[in-house]
Amino acid sequence: MEFDLDKATLRPAADDDEARTVKERLVAAGIDGSRLTTAGYGATRPLAKDGDPDAAARNRRVELVRH
């Protein structure tokens, strides 16, 4: 399944919106929404440091965690 989200942002509210969008797409694909939670972390949990030329692309992501 592929998702095309807008550019990464430093605004946590926008990141929450993007996380909800992913959840909505998963629910539309048949996943039970009660099994999913969302959270947008913005710039608080980057994978790549600012000095990395590919930082923005690496930090723009959705993580799925199985509990």
Image (cartoon, helix red, strand yellow):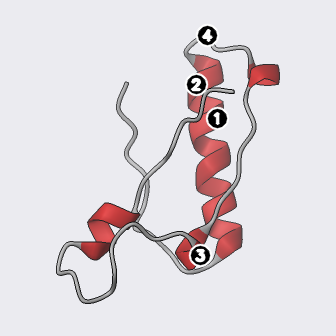
3D distance between C-alphas at marks 1 and 3: 21 Å
Secondary structure type for disc 2: helix
Dot 3 lies on which element? helix
Quadrant where the image shows the N terminus: top left
Q: Is residue 43 above or below residue 5?
A: below
With respect to residue 11, does 63 lie above or below? above
Numbered disc 1: secondary structure: helix
Under mark 4, the amino acid is Gly
Quadrant of the rendered structure where residue 2 is? top left
* Residue at numbered disc 2: 26
Residue at image position (54%, 77%) is: 43
Mark 1, residue position: 23
**How many angstroms separate mark 4 from mark 2 (CA)?**
7 Å
Mark closer to the observer (4, 3)? 3
- Looking at the rendered structure, which numbered label has been put on residue 30? 4
Q: Which residue is mark 3?
A: 44
Find out whether the residues at labels 2 and 3 contact each other: C-beta distance under 8 Å: no
Q: Residue at x 40, y 61 (%)?
A: 60
Q: In this view, which residue lies farthest toward the right?
A: 34
Q: Earlier in the sequence, mark 4 or mark 1?
A: 1
Question: Quadrant of residue 29 in the image?
Answer: top right
The residues bearing labels 4 and 1 have C-alpha atoms spaced at a distance of 11 Å
Q: Is residue 63 above or below residue 7?
A: above
Whole-percent x, y for residue 53 in the image: 17, 80
Q: Are marks 4 and 3 in contact (CB under 8 Å)?
A: no
Identify the image quadrant of the C terminus. top right
Going from N to C along the chain, the mark reached first, 1 or 3, is 1
Q: Is residue 30 left or right of residue 58?
A: right
The mark that comes first in sequence, 4 or 3, is 4
Q: Amino acid at mark 1?
A: Lys
